Amino acid sequence: MVERVFDRLPFDSLRCSDDFIVHKRLLSSGILEIPSQMIWLFLNALSTFRQGKQLVKYIGDFYDKSYVPGGGRSSVVSLDWSTLHPELLLAAYQSQTREGSGTGDGNGFSEVGVESSCCCVWNLKYRQTAPEYVFTYRVDITAATLAEFNPALVIGGTRGGQIVLWDSRVNRRTPVQMTHLAGDGAAHVEAICGLVDTGNRFSNNIISVSSEGRLCTWAVDMFGAPIQTLDLTPSSGTSASSGGMKRSSNPITPTCLALLPDPDASRFLVGSQDGSVYAGSRHGKNAGLTVQFEGHRAPVTGVSVLAGAEVAALSDGVSAVTVCGVEGPLFVTTGMDCSVRLWSVRESPAYPLLSYEDRNDYFVGCDASPIHPGLFATTDLSGCLDLWSLNSDHEVPTASTLVEGDALLNRCRFHKKGFHLAVGGDDGRVRLFELHENLAMPKSDEHVQLNHLIRKLSNSAAEEYDVQNHAYRYGHVR
């Protein structure tokens, strides 16, 4: 039996490796008495891990402790690739040594002359040991992004609720423009947890969300006051996945932000500390939160919309752009409940299509490939980077890699072309990974396969939802 199991291994090189030869001898001699089914599962998992190592290749990192605050002991809090110059990568750092060291006040502010946070712009093409640009501020940076249509501008959000703007054309590392401080007519009074630059080359706006539950829209050239302010309070029209209507007079506590595909960037997703994800709109009569996605049992740490997720319906005569018969794209979320969940934006009820809950560590970051409709990446506090290709295997990661050292991975970001991935950790390093073409490049029928899969998952999830909802209504929930 053992011989037959080993002969079924999918990779010739794997069957010939030293580790498997040793395990084969032990199992064949009866030293390890394990059922054949368990043997096959074990070997299949190891072969998948080896395949994953071939699909994801570590190619180096960006790190320089002379520029990173705290003597290099800083956490990467934000990553962003440039659209106009694809080789440039922005990394925002937050010092871990400020509090308790006598250099700060414990509220995110450092003493005069002491830099608490910085943003570094690295170059993937030349791989220099030092960043091309360094921008600093004496308040903790909690979010940062590169301007979509101006390669010289870097936008940051701070723990105090300020939006700051740096310009690489100016010979200075400090911001050239910033919003008001809290208590001085500020739009935000708490930490910025989401920051997106949107629009076009002639008119682009900055969308920010802070942890006090406020979403603001800013003009890049006017930081005196926001164009629009929206308090994220669940209203009587907010549909919940439980089938009821959630009403509250208090704003939610956002943790992350993502925009949904929309010509005017009106629709958005916000993760919150209550474990829910809320969909909303910035314009129209229904401006505000409209749908609540309940699923996580702990704060949501990341949300990302899958590329090209609005798949055309396969049925003849259906002209609307739909996913599994319902309008709306796919998005993925991670949470402190050690889970990853896949969703489709839809009308109530809103339930997850997939849930991965087999980890013992927090998932703290996720990002979707910009070119592959079914590929996304996640990071967790164990130092593991997972790549999930839904059409390859929707139950387990397609490729996984564990970084060296004891770094806690908290951010990941796909390159605009989809073949590289930047991963940030709490050790101040930005690790770079190269994806194999078989993983990064979508096949010609990728959308068709994904549409079939989503229809299947939607039917299964709907049945499970009906069973759970019936048990809840009639008091059969344990």
Image (spheres, helix red, strand yellow):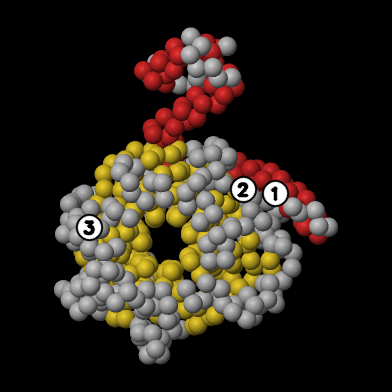
On the question of residue 167 being in view, the answer is: no
Q: Amino acid at mark 3?
A: Gly
Q: For the residues carrying marks 3 and 2, which lies nearer the camera in this image?
A: 3
Say if mark 2 contacts mark 1, CB within 8 Å: yes
Residue 94's spot in the image, x, y percent?
30, 65
Say if mark 3 contacts mark 2, CB within 8 Å: no
Residue 354 is labelled as: 2
Sequence order check, earlier mark of 2 and 1 = 2
User: Element at badge 2?
Assistant: strand
What's the distance in space between the residues labelled 3 and 2, CA to CA? 38 Å
Q: Is residue 224 left or right of residue 210?
A: left
Q: Quadrant of residue 97?
A: bottom left
Sequence order check, earlier mark of 3 and 1 = 3
Question: Could you say which is closer to the camera, residue 69 or residue 369?
Answer: 69
Residue under numbered circle 1: 461
Q: Could you tell me which residue is drawn at 17 percent across and 76 percent down?
A: 113
Q: Could you tell me which residue is drawn at 34 percent across and 38 percent down?
A: 57
* Label 3 packing within 10 angstroms: few (<14), some (14-19), many (20+): some
Whether 434 is drawn above or below 169: the answer is: above
Residue 455's spot in the image, x, y percent?
68, 46
Q: Amino acid at mark 2?
A: Leu
Image quadrant in which the N terminus is located? top right
* Label 2 packing within 10 angstroms: few (<14), some (14-19), many (20+): some
What's the distance in space between the residues labelled 2 and 1, CA to CA? 8 Å
Sequence order check, earlier mark of 3 and 2 = 3
Question: Could you say which is closer to the camera, residue 393 or residue 100?
Answer: 100
User: Element at badge 1?
Assistant: helix
Give the total number of marks visible in the rendering: 3
Residue under numbered circle 3: 72
Q: Could you tell me which residue is drawn at 39 percent across and 55 percent down?
A: 411
Residue 125's spot in the image, x, y percent?
24, 49
